[in-house]
Image (spheres, grey):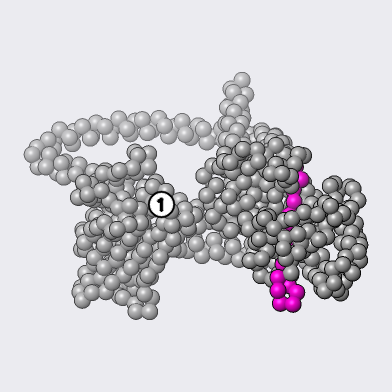
Amino acid sequence: MNKITEHQKISSYFFVFSLGLIITFVLVDMTFFSDQLEKTAMNNALSKIKEKEKTFSSYFNTPKDILESTRKSNYFNKYLNNPKLYKSELDDIFLTISSINKNIMQFRFIDKNGIEKIRIDRNNKDLKPIIVNKNGLQNKSNRYYFSDSKEKEIEKVWYSNIDLNMEKGKVIKPFIPTLRAMLPISFNNEFAGVLIINYFMADALNELIHTSLYDIILLNEKGDYLVHHDNTKNWSFYNNEENALENEFNIYTKYILKDNLIQNKKFISKSLDFDTPEKLKILVQFKNEYLVKNQKEKLNQYLIVSLIIVLLSLLMSILFSKYLKKLFFILKDTKKLNVVLGHKVSEKTKELQELNENLEHKVKEEIKKNKEKEEQLFAQAKLAAMGDMIGNIAHQWRQPLSLISTNASGIKLRHQFGQYDYEELPVHMDKIVEKTQYLSETIDTFRNFLTEGKEYKDIVLQDSINMALDIVNSSLRDNFIELENNINKLSPICINTISGELSEVIINVINNAKDVIIDKEVDDAYIKVNLIHLNKKIVISIEDNGGGIPDDIMPRIFEPYFTTKHKTQGTGLGLHMSYKIITDSLMGRIYAQNTDDGAKFFIELPLD
């Protein structure tokens, strides 16, 4: 009966261990790999955008080619010389071209006075084009496309914006997306008129946003949607949805409109290179239905792995129950012995306390308490610095780890879709090896920083500063903060100091500046680092554009536990530790001043 009880205990321990292992596996997978499919798909999305952009450009090139070919034709030049004699032939040419290309909605020639001379109309893509008779030709001299064409470069095609077809100032419903291409022409060195094609763009827009893996949006530089994967949001300007982009993408809106290319795990935004007055942008997101499917597959994986772990744990509990039973007995005896020894130690300690209750003991006790407080203060600061260091390591590793994972997942994904070219395998493997070597170099950098001793030694000052900058650079870059390193490497400065502590101070000051910039959401943020060599000392300056330090708290910034951050974000020990290191260990001086844009910290160290 006793054996059964021990075996049950061992089995229960292994069962608890297996549960912990399962939970750890799930948490690690969810933390680091849960969005891997989405990341891989978004990395491949850029090539999909380029493919779509190339296809979409044909809808710009086709009307351009038609206009240029028509302009160069002998019949058109003969018509310009003798309109009455060759009008019939040119009508037939315009009609034939429009019949061949069903996307031509309207093909016209307007003379130098703004009068339509030839006009082919097609009201619907599925209908045949017709020649508009003389009575249907209109005066277009007051239309923008005629007046603007007179100002444009002669014999060069230009485009309107992609817009909805309108009649008498009102949008035609159902919507008919249209692109207008215009070619101003000259004859006998004079402006002779305009060739114009109105081009159906519905097929082009549908082809642009149609894809099995991605949700695609086409918008203009003002943030108005032209077409959206959700049809109810098409042509947002005409649906009185002026803030459609901001409502959907919140804080990313200004970056989408400002930057030519944005690529993150949520979406990709890219400016399209088409000669329309309002520049176009394409925005790509991974389809949510694929994310749901991936989550279901993940759940199945978790269940299978959990079952395997539980079965293995039960098997191990059976195999090692005899050995663990002996270990439990030893532990029980050890606990009893510890209790006995604990009582004896307590008794001896009490005796010593009673013998040493005198004035000298109290003085030493107070000194000890003060020292412990100082050590505790330094320990807290070290822990905070270690937290920042772990954050810096995470920033350094995130991009190469993501690239390694992306290459591996990309190979798997493209293999699953039957699109993988095995000739590309060496290239992908080289990228993975390259990033692995980078991770190894990163480990060496952080190890060199963490293992620096607390003894004075001769160092090259620029190397110590640059090591600190390398550690924080990735974190700054990820928060859109430019690090301007103005350290001159060509004139090495040798100094006898504690290298690790100097690097720690530089990291503390930069991290403090970074936190202020992030909290204030500073645009075009920067941190500048300079090194000045004076006669008997060197001065390191660290400047930011975070708005500066209020005058009323400037005298207190180096006090322990003083911070302007929320208690969950700061301990108030970073700058105090930096002050203690510079003044007590390195025999130098640290102070701060405000500039026009922010704060500037100075670290002065003696060269003696």
The reply, left or right, for residue 69 in relation to residue 114 is right
301, 572: nearer the viewer:
572
Q: Quadrant of residue 585?
A: bottom left
Q: Which residue is mark 1?
A: 522
Q: Quadrant of residue 134?
A: bottom right
Please, what is the dominant secondary structure of the magenta stretch? strand
Give the vertical position of 576 relative to 154 (above or below). above
Q: Which residues are magenta?
A: 175-191
How would you rate the neighbour count of disc 1 (Cα within 10 Å): few for under 14, some for 14-19, many for 20 or more?
some
318, 556: nearer the viewer:
556
SS at mark 1 in the image: loop
Determine if residue 515 is in view: no
Question: Residue shown at 49%/60% (left/top)?
Answer: 443
Q: Quadrant of residue 337?
A: top left
Give the vertical position of 599 relative to 314 (above or below). below
The mark tally for this picture is: 1
583, 457: nearer the viewer:
583
Question: Residue shown at 78%/58% (left/top)?
Answer: 116
- Amino acid type, residue under disc 1 in the picture: Val
